[in-house]
Image: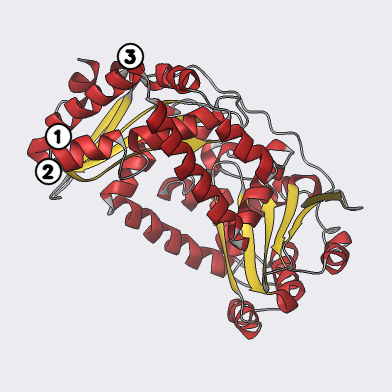
Amino acid sequence: MVKTVKLKCGTTLVMEKTDYVQSAALGIWVKAGAVDESEDVSGVSHYIEHMMFKGTESRTAKEIAADVDRIGGMFNAFTGKEATCYYIKTLSSNICKGAEILLDMLTCSKFDPEEMDKERQVIFEEIKMVKDSPDDDVFDTISELVASGNPFGRSILGTPESLSGIDRDKLTGYYREKYARDSIVVAVAGNFDEDAVREIFENRLLSLNESRQPRQLEVGAYRQSFNVKERDIEQTHICLAAPGVSLDDDRYYAFVLMNSILGGSMSSRLFQNIREEKGLAYSVYSTNSFASSWGYFSIYAGVAHDKAEAALDAIRYELDELRKSGVTAEELAMAKEQVKSAYIFGLENVNSRMFSIGKNELLLDKVYTPEEVLRGFDGVTENDVLEAASMIGDYSAYCGAAVTGRSFDLEGLVRG
């Protein structure tokens, strides 16, 4: 059972206790991500996330890591389009000690200028690493294309130019503005003492501002666009994308099941056609990217340079078939079992549960129970999937990105 508590300090605490495990995961979620940034500070949310690990008033960076190891914990953080999350997993008996370490990082980080310069170089290398990974690069590129002109198209990492212009004043100013108590959700899952966790967080965030200006995101009209990058690589990486639905859209469950049938598993249509039957690609799949007020659907394929056109033709064929004929009762039943099984398996992982309840509470102000989720999938009909397919089935309307060793007319092939 999930319990949601509004702490006296204004922060929300969401807890899901599972007595039969011996571990717990705790995450501090902050409503600060790429969508909140302006172009001149692009990447600052991610930059702050890195700096949280570089030392506090009472701990050096090495001591932070040693204190986590001392309690046998595993900790990390990530920054997304809409949120930043700092999390730790420990034995149940040590979760309060883990929470104290995260709180020290969140409220007492020094943001030392010398360490900032070092970490800026680390992020430069991270940007290069993405560029050197064609599959990562093509997904970053398609994300920017399909959301062009929208906040969701902004880069999480930023650019070398934007990062070079972020000094300590800009970084701490953004931190003070966005890291407010009403924009933070603490999520805990596993076996833990609810009262002890609540007591730790009741007064430990008072050094942060009470509130921040409400986030206002304007999602503009979709614009089709293309980007082909030539590199000295042995394979062509293609990604197509079109607008989808948001996290709390009524069609969310239909989109998840449609994706499973089209390209989300080894029995999916794309995998069976493009890899198994035609042998065009080692990796081919589709995926949904959901955000609080927007989303997109994408298809990826990694193929030999001379197989790009054939792979695109096969993708076009499967999208046309899906849009015209929908799915069979057998396909839908299989997809439901696959998706529900994956969801239930996740319920048995305390990290997965913490991520789920924390993200939903932060972005949607609500947490769905497992029963609600399973009912959502069970209620999807063949007509619901057909409606979802009609939204993403027009191949000629997709954005397209490619990282390739041989130039080709991606726009011409998609537009027809």
**What separation in Å lies between label 3 and label 1 (alpha carbons)?**
24 Å
Q: Is residue 187 above or below residue 416?
A: below
Residue nearest the viewer, comparing 267 with 248: 267
Residue 154 in picture, x, y percent from top left? 48, 37
Residue 139 visible from this viewpoint: yes
Residue 53 in picture, x, y percent from top left? 59, 68
Side (left or right) of 212 relative to 386: right
Residue nearest the viewer, comparing 94 with 1: 1
Side (left or right) of 273 relative to 348: left
Which residue lies under the disc numbered 1?
308
CB under 8 Å between discs 2 and 1: yes
Residue at coordinates 58% horizontally, 81% vertically from top-left?
62
- First in residue order: circle 3 vs circle 1: 1
Residue reaching furthest left?
A: 306
Nearer the viewer's eye, disc 3 or disc 1?
A: 3
Residue 126 in picture, x, y percent from top left? 40, 58
Residue at coordinates 37% horizontally, 40% vertically from top-left?
264
Packing grade of label 1 (10 A; few <14, some 14-19, many >=20) is many
Identified by mark 2, the residue type is: Ala
Packing grade of label 3 (10 A; few <14, some 14-19, many >=20) is few
Which residue lies under the disc numbered 2?
304
Which residue lies under the disc numbered 3?
324
